[in-house]
Image (tube, coloured by chain):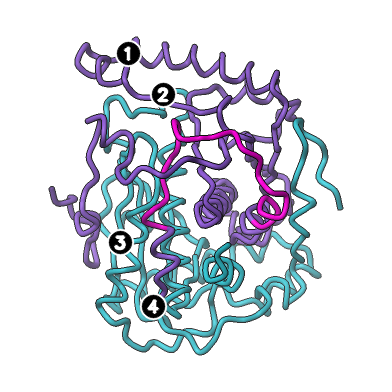
Chain colours: A purple, B cyan
Amino acid sequence: MSSQLYDVIHRRRDVRGQFTGAPIPPAVLDRVLAAAHAAPSVGLSQPWDFILVSDETTRAAFHDHVQQERATFASTLDPGAAATFSKIKIEGVRESTLSVVVTYDPDRGSPAVLGRHAIADAGLYSVCLAIQNLWLAATAENLGVGWVSFYREPFVQDLLGIPATIRPVAWLCLGPVTHLEHTPDLERHGWRHRTPWQSAVHENRWSPPVG
Amino acid sequence: MSSQLYDVIHRRRDVRGQFTGAPIPPAVLDRVLAAAHAAPSVGLSQPWDFILVSDETTRAAFHDHVQQERATFASTLDPGAAATFSKIKIEGVRESTLSVVVTYDPDRGSPAVLGRHAIADAGLYSVCLAIQNLWLAATAENLGVGWVSFYREPFVQDLLGIPATIRPVAWLCLGPVTHLEHTPDLERHGWRHRTPWQSAVHENRWSPPVG
């Protein structure tokens, strides 16, 4: 039994509005990145990279792009959902201390990646495991993480000089926060509510989720 | 600073050969599943399900399928790689206590999943975050986890009655273990070696990985 791990897992939030912009001590950032890099990966391919974006001009350009994508999504909503969405902050790119862009290189460990011949996306899955390690380590270090997903991948590739063969998987905002909210933003604003974990568990065969 | 979390992150292994088959206490399994379900998800969609496969006939059928896929992969290797691969165990399906099959439902939270309009795979990413929570919680509980990826998704859908719209993302072996290896199996057997985390870190723009 392991109360600190569970505490971190359940306290972790997807942060938008609570970033302070204060510096991240270098030793803390090193521990967080080393934790991400310690994730499991298909065929031990470690197919991830982490681009640390501190440059303000770059982050401002990304922020502007995200605002355009926000408008695109908003235009697809019915009036009720649009009203709810209008109250929801979707990124803290400029207020957070650092952006960490996580990428996937499908050529790492090629040609024969052990465990990927039947499931092409297995390498992409590995990158996500590294992201969750990063997220939990940051939470344990009293940093906030916010995953921004209102962007087009080609825009980010162009902005950061990422080759066409490398896929951006996440744009993460990272930094000290005033606090972590007890309840996720989307639940506080009435967008969606969390289900109990039991509703997602099935015995031996698929069955429709309960509730 | 959070020594228990980092200890778990760095001790975690992808287990094949160390399962004992001993029972998992129900309260422990509940904590592990609740930790998985506490993962972040795009638009709070929680698009994952967990099928707990204890049935031995089902697990034997999956095991046989994995052996066929092992042969398929082996046939693609040059002689040196094939010799190395022949020593590597790729699954502990029958020796482990329980299989946990994790699936992705792209329709959960539809039609407007907040944060997924520009990145169709964002829901799939969420499922992987839940898997890493599960993996770390299990490690903290002194259970081993082994992600088996030598399978075809349609086979697993058919075996477990999973609808065509639901995608199997992982077949995880779970259970008590004699120990966790200090060094990953693939490194011990000379398949691949881990890189230092610094090789994956870049400043402000993409650059080729070092080393």
Q: Residue A50: x and y, percent? A: 68, 43
Q: Tag 4: residue type? A: Met
Do badges 1 and 3 share one subunit? no
Q: Is residue A41 above or below residue A77?
A: below
**Gap in angstroms between the C-alphas marked 1 and 2:** 9 Å
Same chain for mark 2 and mark 3? The answer is yes
Q: Earlier in the sequence, mark 2 or mark 3?
A: 3
Q: Is residue B14 visible?
A: yes
Give neighbour class at mark 1: few <14, some 14-19, many 20+ (Cα, 10 Å): few
On residue B117, which mark appears? Answer: 2
Looking at this view, is B160 or A197 the one in front?
A: A197
Picture residue at 77% right of the left edge, 36% below the top: B203
The crowding category of the residue bearing disc 4, from other C-alpha atoms within 10 Å (few below 14, some 14 to 19, many at least 20), is few
How far is mark 1 from mark 4, CA to CA? 46 Å
Q: Amino acid at mark 2?
A: His
Residue at 61% of width from left, 37% of height from top?
A22
Q: Which residues are magenta?
A: A9-31
Identify the residue under disc 1.
A76
Residue situated in front as seen by the camera: A159 or B174? A159
Q: Chain of mark 2?
A: B
Instruction: Name the residue carrying label 4.
Output: A1
Amino acid found under the numbered disc labelled 3:
Ala
* Alpha carbon distance from label 2 to label 3: 28 Å
Q: On residue B34, which mark appears? A: 3
- A22 is within the stretch colored magenta: yes
